[in-house]
Amino acid sequence: MAVKPRTQQQRRDATRSTVLENACALFGTRGYQATSLEEIAEISGTTIRPIYHYYSSKKNLFQAVTERMETQLFEALQQVQSGQNGAESLADYWEAFMQFGRDPAFRQIVLVDAPVILGRERWAHSPVVRQAIEVLVSLLPHLQPETRLLIARMAVAALTEAAMSLSEPGHVGKEKAFDEISTIIRAGLMQFGG
């Protein structure tokens, strides 16, 4: 049985997907500034022209990469949401977030470069942050709405800062420190909800 040749649209979709994958890899390992569209095109087996056709600029390609990573985190948090409730669920949110926070590519793209290239406000209004704030606010029903929101925003900022600290060079024991901090936070969250 002969294999049907791919359509023009299938070839375009494959090229676009390959470019996005390779852009994720390069932006994640080298950062936005040290990555060129020419390099992305070369490892994608294409020219720079299709990249401009699909994304129109390096910044737009980077935004697509960032959104892809944020979507993966959002989906992981949604899986937690479909599980337990209460403090155990909150501890599971922490663990899900920190799995991404331990990924050097995620840290580089979403936490280091995206706020500079795409703006800090973008992260603050992302689906991931909105979901985290909703969960945190729901755990504090006895406080005034303004207080709940402030505490939730502070917690999200602390989580982001914690993940960012993993990307700082020169901290030999930081991975172990994060494991220890995660254990303490998980225990504290369980006690808070208990």
Image (cartoon, rainbow, N blue to C red):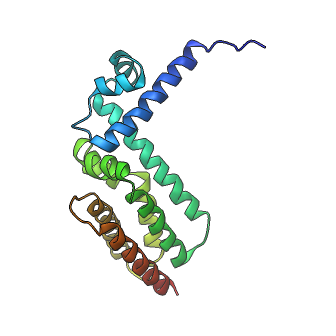
Q: Is residue 152 above or below residue 143?
A: above
Q: Is residue 48 above or below residue 129?
A: above
Name the residue at 47% across, 47% down.
71
Q: Nearer the viewer, residue 52 or 178?
A: 178
Q: Nearer the viewer, residue 174 or 7?
A: 174
Q: Position of residue 69 (x, y in %)?
A: 43, 46
**Residue 152 seen anywhere in this rendered image of the structure:** no
Name the residue at 38% across, 18% down.
53
Name the residue at 44% across, 34% down.
21
Name the residue at 22% across, 58% down.
169
Q: As drawn, is 21 to the left or to the right of 62?
A: right
Q: Point out the residue furthest to the front here.
A: 172
Q: Position of residue 41 (x, y in %)?
A: 36, 23
Q: Quadrant of residue 156?
A: bottom left
Q: Is residue 166 above or below residue 58?
A: below
Q: Position of residue 115 (x, y in %)?
A: 26, 49
Q: Point out the residue furthest to the right here.
A: 1
Query: Where is the N terminus found, in terms of image quarters?
Result: top right
Q: Quadrant of residue 164?
A: bottom left
Q: Nearer the viewer, residue 140 or 89?
A: 89
Q: As drawn, is 1 to the left or to the right of 83?
A: right
Q: Position of residue 103 (x, y in %)?
A: 39, 54
**Residue 50 seen anywhere in this rendered image of the structure:** yes
Total labels drawn = 0
Q: As drawn, is 169 to the left or to the right of 154?
A: left
